[in-house]
Image (cartoon, rainbow, N blue to C red):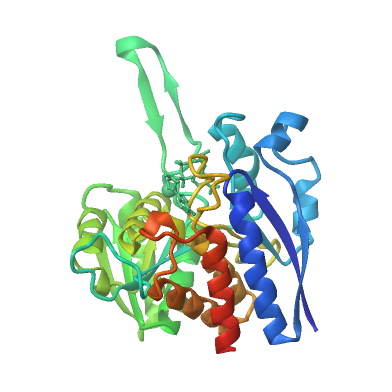
Amino acid sequence: MKKIELSVIPGDGIGKEVVPEAIRVLDTVANIHGGLKFNNIEYPWSSQYYVEHGKMMPDNALDLLSQSDAIFLGAIGDPALVKDHISLGGLLLKIRREFEQVINVRPAKLLKGMVSPLSNPKDFDMIIVRENSEGEYSSSGGRVHNGIDEIVVQNAVFTKKGVSRVMEYAFELARKRSGHLTSATKSNGIVHSMPFWDEVLSEISQKYSDVQMQNIHIDALSAFFITKPQTMDVVVASNLFGDILSDIGGAIMGSIGIAPAANINLNGKYPSMFEPVHGSAPDIYGKGIANPIGQIWTAKMMLDHLGEEELGALVLEAIEDTLHAGIKTPDIGGKSTMTEVTDTIISNIEEKA
Ligand code: NAI
Ligand code: MG
């Protein structure tokens, strides 16, 4: 019996609705597998927890989480209770940083049955590999003087270690997929860090002569995400560029409600964390109409990470069949409830297994 110790943090808003739905799907595939079991420990850490305890998580939270094989998170943020920078900083960002989840992986794929806002989307299927620990998102810098004399410095920090490991990860992934890698650069305008990025790319590429590689400036690449997304496969990018590209990726898929993500720890010292791209959606919380697909597709990414790729593929197929049959929540033009969508996904899984 393969036992997976899973830390579950539903969090705030629709996180509390879609996480239990994805757990139902995980239990279904574990049953089908027969030799797989999820031991879930659920933690109530959230904005409500902050109101009661003055912090987003208890002091021993990271100790507790570190004992699990993976972390499955819904969404964090309830601006009516806690300011966003406090809730995100006190939980999500803390886990990402302390657990050295240095890579963020976000697929963008045109699912069967989805309508893209692009008029001619072709059949795109890519994975954005975003550096998740350094780059443009750094606390290095400061502000001096006031008024007209004010000076602000914001440093971007790129390390050989950080850039090399994200490149290696992306090349490995490209090798497993179509053998095609695109890098997002801007070495014509950002004259220190981006030429360095290009140099590391070129250095690492020596080991991967079987992978076809292109290096495109971020402005042109953003446009290509709209005009010819079907030409991309694995896309590697710095923290900021990857953040922006993955939002475009989510947008052309048709809704933020279906977009999944994974925060990957590479050194094996800590668990990786799986969370959908969307937030807590306070505007629809409690109505039973949240789209569960982002969370369920995230569960598929977790299955892949845990070495259960066949089950992962089964989940994605069941999602596509559900969409194709028109069983959709209102955010993607349907009339079904969250529960109806999950129920259909589960029965599609059971039928295929
Ligand atoms: P959001 O992603 O929560 O919502 C944006 C829009 O998309 C809303 O109209 C919402 O109804 C819709 N939406 C999102 N997910 C959906 C789903 N599964 N099904 C149907 N519709 C969906 O982003 P917003 O409104 O900017 O942020 C709300 C709260 O979430 C804030 O507190 C923010 O800080 C937090 N947040 C947390 C994230 C995380 O935990 N990783 C990521 C983004 C935002
Ligand atoms: Mg973002």
Residue 238 or 123: which is nearer the viewer? 123
Residue 309 visible? The answer is yes
Residue 101 or 32: which is nearer the viewer? 32
User: Percent position (x, y) of residue 216?
Assistant: 24, 63
Toward which corner of the image does residue 28 lie, by quadrant? bottom right
Q: Is residue 283 left or right of residue 50?
A: left
Q: Residue furthest top?
A: 147
Depicted 248 relative to depicted 174: above or below: above
Residue 123 or 23: which is nearer the viewer? 23
Tally the numbered discs.
0
Residue 206 or 233: which is nearer the viewer? 233
Toward which corner of the image does residue 3 lie, by quadrant? bottom right
Depicted 24 relative to depicted 250: above or below: below
User: Percent position (x, y) of residue 71?
Assistant: 67, 60
Q: Is residue 5 left or right of residue 29?
A: right
Give the position of the C terminus as an image quadrant: bottom right
Give the position of the N terminus as an image quadrant: bottom right
